[in-house]
Amino acid sequence: MKRFIFGFLFFILICVSAHGFELRIGDVTNVKGVRPNQLIGYGIVAGLQGTGDGNTEEFTIQSIANALKKMNVSMPANIVSGLQTKNIAAVIVTAQLPPFAKEGNTIDVTVSSIGDAKSLQGGTLLLTPLKAPNGAVYAVAQGSVSIGGYNMGSGGTRVRKNHSTVGTIPNGAIVERHVDVNINAKQKITLDLKKQSFLMSSHIAASINKFYRSHIADPVDSGSVDVVVPDLYKGNVVEFISQINQLYVESTSKPVVVLDEKTGTVVIGGDVTIEPVSISHGDITVTIESIKRVSQPNSFAKGKTKRVTNKKVSVEESKGSLLSFSKGANVGDLVNALNKSGATPRDMMAIFEAIKRAGALNADLKVM
C-alpha cells in the first residue's frame, strides 16, 4: 500500500514570494514612545474550596493578617500563626496598560499562584494595586478568577483540565492613572521597525517621501526611521500618523522554514530555494535537476525567443543513496519527491536540518 507522509505529518506550504507582496507601514512599525506598559501587583485570592495554600506558607498567613488589620480587625500573634488558609492563595497579578489608556478604562489581568495552591477555581481576587517599575499605582484589580478548566479529585484520583493555578479576570482592573503622551505636540516622530532590516528601513523612508513629494523621512539605522511632521499636520499629528500607517512598502523578509518536532509540523514560507548539495539519508534517493532550454517561435509568429527552465524529478529507493539537488531547485520539488518516496516526518526534519547545516537552504530554519 502506498504510504502518505500526511498520515504522520501535517505539512503546510505557504506559497508566498518573499519579494512579491506589500505590507502596510503600520503593520511593520511602531511609533516611538507609543507603547504599552507592564504592571504588577501582589494579592490574595479568597473563596477557594480547600485548594488554597494551606498553613505552610507564612507569607500567605501574614498577608491575611495585614489585610484584616487594614479593615480594623486585629488578632493576637498566637492566633495569626494558627490560621488555616486552605481557602485562600497568595498570587501575583500582572497586566498590560495600553498606550493612551485613560482613568476609568478597564484592562484584563492575569492571576498566578506563588504558593502551593492546588487550584484557583472559584476564587475571588481581593483589591490589588498594580504598579509600574517606578512604583506608582496605575490600576487596581479585583474580581472573580476564571481558569478555563478544573482540578478535582478524591481518594487518590484526580482529574485536571488546563492549568488550574493561573487564571484571568477579563476587564478585571480599573485604570487609575494614565501615561501622559501629547502626540499632537511633536515636531518629529520616529518609526521603530518591529523586525530590524536596513532594506526595509530604506523602503519605508522612500515610500513616505514619495507620497508627500518631499524629503521628510530619513532612515536612521536598521531599526528606525525619523519623520519630520509637515507644517500642514502640525498640531494634528494623529492624522499624519494614520496616513503613514496606510502606506505600503515591499516586503523584504527572508523565507522561513519552521520545524515543530513535538507535533510533526513543518511550515515553509516564501520561495525557499536550495543550492547544489547532495545528502545521504537511509534508503531514499531524490534527484532534482534544472534543465535550461530555449523556446524558439516559428518564423511567422510574433513571439520572442525565451530561455525556459524545466525541472526533472525522479525518485528511487535503494540502500546507501544520495539526495542530489542542482542550482535552481526549490523546496516544493523536494517535498513532492519525499512524498512519493513515503518519507517519515523524522526523515523530512533530518533532511531540512542537514541541508541548513550544509549552507544550502536559502531560508532561516527554526526548530521548536
Image (spheres, rainbow, N blue to C red):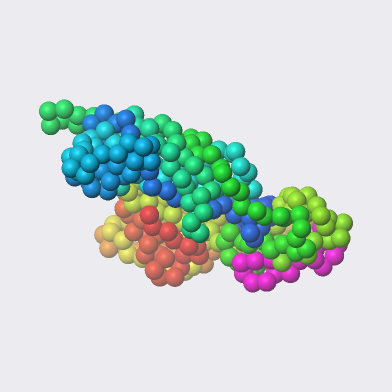
Q: Which residues are magenta?
A: 205-225
Residue 280 x/y as whole percent:
32, 64
Tell me how many marks there are: 0
Residue at 48% in and 36% down:
172
Is residue 207 highlighted in magenta?
A: yes
Rendering coords of residue 274 (x, y %): 49, 64
Please say whether residue 187 is visible from this viewpoint: yes
Q: Residue at x 42, y 65 (%)?
A: 356
Relative to 68, 56 lies left or right: left
Q: Is residue 281 magenta?
A: no
Q: Is residue 248 left or right of residue 89?
A: right
Horizontal side of residue 102 vs 149, given as left or right: right
Q: Out of 237 and 304, give the one closest to the viewer.
A: 237
Q: Quadrant of the C terminus?
A: bottom left
- Spot occupied by residue 347 in the image (x, y as percentages of width and height): 33, 54
Which residue is at 22% across, 41% downward? Answer: 76
- Position of 343 relative to 144 (above/below): below
Asked whether the viewer can see residue 278, the reply is no
Percent position of residue 295, x then y: 68, 59
- Give the farthest residue toward the left: 155
Rendered view: 32 above or below 8 = below
